[in-house]
Amino acid sequence: MTNSLGILGGGQLGMFICEAATKHNIKTTVFSDKKNFSAKNFCDNFLIGSFSDQKLLDEFINSSNFFTIETENIPIEVIKQIEKRKKIFPSSNIVEITQNRLKEKNFLNSINGVKTAKFEKIQSFYDLEKYFKLFGKIGILKSCEMGYDGKGQYLISDKNINNFKQTDLKDYIFEEVLDFNKEISVIVCCSKKDTILYPPVENIHKNSILRQSIYPARIGSKVKNEALLLAKKIAVELKLHGILAIEMFLMKNDELLINELAPRPHNSGHWSLDFCKYSQFESLIFSIFKEKVMQPEPLNSCKMINVIGEDYEEKKKISEKYKFYDYFKGEIKKLRKMGHYTFKN
Ligand code: ADP
Ligand code: MG
């Protein structure tokens, strides 16, 4: 029982967490709200059902002594219940902030020296029209909760704004469109005693979905150090124990704006599976089960490519050339992340 980990969510991130846990002799129990999930054949035990099923949740809480998440989109009451009885990494406070864009952005802007894109809270179509005009008749409408891979986001212009007249806009923000130079991300991981940082990678998105991560990010050393500093600062403010990914926009004047936080391993950190001595998943395990986290020790410059939707049909061809990571999704869906591969660059 000492070395057991309960994981909320069983997607590809959960699957990789299970693999890292197994490598270090830690027994895993996955709680999934989906019948078929990536981690199914990688965990020691699993529970399937609604997170709000109290009986299942009790069973899950009894299954392990430490807990983590592979998505921040878990009802906060569930995280709080676990926290009352066992240790969960990240804390409920971190999940509460990062699962809601408005809370997250208010938190970020409250930190000295940390900035985000300009945004406004939206509660009605009236608000949307108001800020649309104030922002120069362009902006992004983003749902506060449950968004990922660009879901729940709409680029608003004169052409489509009226389509939102009937939409319930209670829980949205409206954000300025940034003309950024590039996107980068940093992963920070903290144990009880120390903190490590994965160096910035450069992220290329298409239709708001990550397509490629390039290590190292093609940025100057000043920007790199600033990105690392910002990541550390945010981790300190959150009293992070566990792992956190920080997405940033590098502006044309070299200013860094924070886009969003993810208190779990991140797609842009998958390169660490092959090109670091210690992957982001192992670091998460160390942060929970050991006093010390290890320096990641990158081995080579590389690129990570996401295999999305129908591109999965080419997986045989990909596997002949590269080490292909299959996410074992039940079915191919348009714009769904199906797997990834990495190569030396
Ligand atoms: P998600 O939770 O879906 O990842 P993000 O807010 O990170 O949501 O948005 C996804 C992507 O959309 C970003 O990585 C970026 O490419 C683009 N994007 C988001 N916000 C902006 C913005 N304010 N200006 C320009 N592009 C943006
Ligand atoms: Mg994002």
Image (cartoon, rainbow, N blue to C red):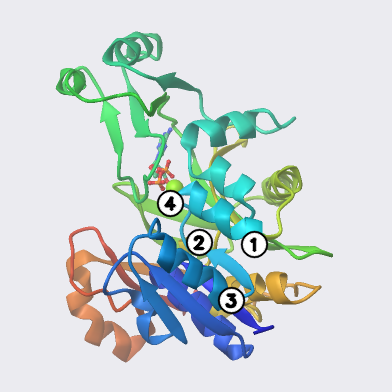
Q: Upstream in the sequence, badge 2 or badge 1?
A: 1
What secondary structure is marked by label 1? helix
At a point 59% along the width and 63% down the height, the residue shown is 216
- Is 34 or 330 nearer to us in this picture? 34
Determine which residue is flagged by label 2: 266
What secondary structure is marked by label 2? loop
Separation of marks 3 and 4 at Cα, in angstroms? 21 Å
Label 4 within 8 A of ligand 1 by Cβ = no
Q: Nearer the viewer, mark 4 or mark 2?
A: 4
At a point 49% along the width and 67% down the height, the residue shown is 58
Determine which residue is flagged by label 4: 73
Q: Are marks 3 and 4 in contact (CB under 8 Å)?
A: no
x, y (%) of residue 4? 61, 81
Determine which residue is flagged by label 1: 85
x, y (%) of residue 195? 77, 62
Q: Upstream in the sequence, badge 4 or badge 2?
A: 4
- Is 292 or 135 nearer to us in this picture? 292
Q: Nearer the viewer, mark 3 or mark 4?
A: 3
At a point 44% along the width and 53% down the height, the residue shown is 74
Q: Nearer the viewer, mark 2 or mark 1?
A: 1
Determine which residue is flagged by label 3: 64
Q: Is residue 284 left or right of residue 270?
A: right
Q: Upstream in the sequence, badge 3 or badge 4?
A: 3
Label 3 within 8 A of ligand 1 by Cβ = no
Amino acid of disc 4: Asn
Separation of marks 4 and 2 at Cα, in angstroms? 14 Å
Q: Upstream in the sequence, badge 3 or badge 1?
A: 3
Q: Quadrant of residue 137?
A: top left
Separation of marks 3 and 2 at Cα, in angstroms? 23 Å
Q: Upstream in the sequence, badge 4 or badge 1?
A: 4
Amino acid of disc 1: Arg
What secondary structure is marked by label 4? loop
